[in-house]
Structures are given as C-alpha cells and as structure tokens.
Image: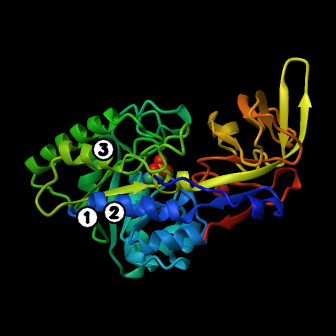
Amino acid sequence: MIKTLFPIETFKHCETPFYYYDLELLKATLHEMNACIKDLPYKVHYAVKANANPRILHEIKEAGLSIDCVSGGEIVAALAAGFKGDTIAFAGVGKTDKEISLGINHDIFCFNVESLAELEVINEIAAAKGKIANIALRINPNIDAHTHEYITTGLSENKFGINLEQIDMAVDKAMSMPDVNLIGLHFHIGSQLLDFTPYKMLCDRINDLQDHFEARGISFKIINVGGGLGINYENPNENPIPDFKNYFDTFRNNLKLRKGQELHFELGRAIVGQCGSLITRVIYVKNGTTKNFVIVDAGMTDLIRPALYQAHHVAENITSSATETARYDIVGPICESSDKFASDETLPLTHRGDLLALRSAGAYGEVMAMQYNCRNLPSTQFSR
Ligand SMILES: *Cc1c(COP(=O)(O)O)cnc(C)c1O
C-alpha cells in the first residue's frame, strides 16, 4: 500500500501554503493504469486542465500518455512539456480562430468538435493553410452522470457537444467537407464518477450509434469516451489509486469495438487527484459560542473546490500528536463566507502553528488558484 508520508521536519521551516506532490504515488498510479490497458487497443489522453504543473506533466509524458487540451494555452503547456502534437486531442465549446490555427499548425491528433458552426470554421482555417484537420464529433449522449450539477456535462440541457438529433446532419456535413477528416466520435459525460452505471449506459448508446452508422456504411477509426473516473476523497490513505481495473473493464465488457478501432480516454482527476495535498498553517484557533474555528493561511484562492462545488477534502493535522480530539470549522482568511474548507471536522486538539494537509488536492487545485485579495499564488514542493 502506498501512503503519502509528509516530510514534516522540512515542512516546519517552509512558508505556507504550498502544494505538496507525492511523485511516487503519481508514478505508481500511472504504472497501475498502464498495466490495465497494456494488451488493449486503448489510449489515454491526460486532461491537462486537472493539473498543468510542468513537473507533473513531465512524469505523465514519461509514462507515455497522450494529452487532452481545452485551450490554446494548454496546447502550449503540453508542447512545452514535450508532448508531441500528434498526441493532442483538443476539446472545448468555444475554440477561437487563433486556437484552431495553433492546433492545425501543430498537426494535432484530433479536434473534438462541439458544434456545426465550429466544424465550418475548422474546415475554413484548414483550407487556408492547405492542411487537413482530423476531427471527432463530440456527441451529447443525454446521460445523467448523477454527479454534482456543476460537473455533469452529458445532458442535452448542458452546453457541451452536439445533440443526438443533429448527429446525422453533423456526420454528413463533416464527410462532405474537403479539409476535415472525420476520424471518430467523442463523448464526456461528467466528472468524479464512482458508480459506473452511467458508463454502461454510455456504452449502450455508443453501440446503437455504431450500428446506426454501420447500416449507412459509415465507420470510425476511434471512439473517445472522455474522462470522469472519480477518486476516493474520504479515504485517501486507504484508496490512493483509483479503481482503474473496474473502470476499463466496464468498457471492455460493454462497448463493442469494431475491428481495428481504438478506444480513447481522457482522464484527469483519476491520474493526479490523490498525489497532491495543500499544506497550510493554522494562524488562529478561535473558540466561538457555537463553533470552534481553525483559521488557516490557505483559502479558496489556493483551493476553490469546497467553495465552488461544495467538495470536501480530508484535513489532517500532520504536526499534532494530541490524542484528544475536537470538532472545528476549518476556514481561510479570504473575505467571503464560502471561504471554508470543512464544517465540524474532527481533528486532534489543534493549536496556532500546527500544519494541516488538505488531502486529495492534486486535481483542480493548484491549477485553479487565483490572486483575489492580492494574495500570492501557492508555491509547490515535490517528494523526491
Ligand atoms: C474535464 C474533461 C476531462 C477530464 O475530466 P476528469 O473528470 O478530470 O477525468 C476529459 N475530457 C473533457 C472533454 C473534459 O472537459
């Protein structure tokens, strides 16, 4: 079992808050994931938006993954980290002309196209450059991922993808265009999924679509099922590595891949979520009349998930050896009531100067940090 061990003596002298990345755990996670797919025609694109730290990107590139970008800036970050253009999938509902140009200049693997309007622009820009752009159509399969409403993406009311009713038209249109090459269908139904029933439903939907298009003599080189595999936020030490085996088995057992077809995935959180912790120092303990507050020097500017999605990160007091516990609200210093990490969290008796680790913060943590209140961005440290 891999458990993140914090170099506490070193931490005591460090300025807080900072993100600490356990690179051993990251490598073990990548190793486990690769082992699960090694004999299968599966390819995983790492979703850069989960964490774009160069050191993290380096490890992921070394493990041989492809990459998934949702902006021109992410394409630049991926190229700087050494990913090759032909491993880049580029998604997003609002790709600008400049971003599309950048993708075409680098001959990226595939544009995941989210509307008919975008399809036309990609075709035009590719034509002007005398190039042919590979595309997959992002289909909104109208499947409820039963996840938080802010991170569900596969319902027809969401802004993402092309609705099922328009997919025939989109395929015909793409095939009639001279400067795009339709290589596949793309889906992404949501994030932080731990129940795989929605993935089974997605497989059924894809099987139907493939039958439908096959009857019309149309086949696709790739199917891309996006990302969304969840992590165990409540027990990071017991479950440091997500259930890759079950996840990939769900697709292996339910999705009927055609001969020669590749299945692509875009995983973000599952790869980097558990390897990161936000380390923060207790500034004050304030005992109120109804609540005890632990006021820490990290805030929603460093880790916004609790404020944005009501997410919970386990807080560990990594310097206290007290056996007596108490319940605390853990709050940051930002002038917003939503700047709160936890309510009624049980901690060992906690004092000014103690260090807390907010666990499972490797995904959508550092990358979402901001400078509200003129604060510094959090710094980073890595295990060796
Ligand atoms: C965010 C995103 C992902 C990654 O999601 P995770 O939940 O982090 O795995 C994959 N594909 C697309 C298109 C995305 O927008």
The correct choice, above or below, for 63 with respect to 255 in the image is: below
Q: Earlier in the sequence, mark 2 or mark 3?
A: 2
- Near-viewer residue (20 or 201): 20
| Residue at 70%, 64% in the rendered image | 380
The answer to whether the residue labelled 1 contacts the one labelled 2, judged by CB atoms less than 8 Å apart, is yes
Spot occupied by residue 220 in the image (x, y as percentages of width and height): 20, 59
- Give the residue at mark 2: 34
Number of numbered labels in the structure image:
3
Which amino acid type corresponds to the residue marked 3 in the rendered image?
Answer: Asn
Where residue 312 appears, x then y in whole percent? 63, 36
Say which label, 3 or 1, has the lower sequence index.
Answer: 1
Instruction: Name the disc covering residue 38, or none.
Output: 1
Q: Residues within 10 Å of mark 1 (few under 14, many from 20)?
A: few
Do tag 2 and tag 3 residues touch (Cβ < 8 Å)? no
Local SS, label 3? helix
Give the image location of residue 337, x and y in percent: 81, 32
Q: Quadrant of the C terminus?
A: bottom right
Q: Residues within 10 Å of mark 3 (few under 14, many from 20)?
A: few
Distance of mark 1 from mark 2, alpha carbons? 6 Å
Q: Is residue 262 left or right of residue 359?
A: left
Instruction: From the viewer's perspective, tell me whether residue 278 is left or right of residue 123.
Output: right
53 and 7: which one is in front?
A: 7
Q: Is residue 56 above or below residue 236?
A: below
Q: List x then y, in percent, for residue 238.
A: 49, 43
Element type at mark 2? helix
Query: Is 23 or 145 nearer to us in this picture?
Result: 23
- Kind of residue at badge 2: Asn
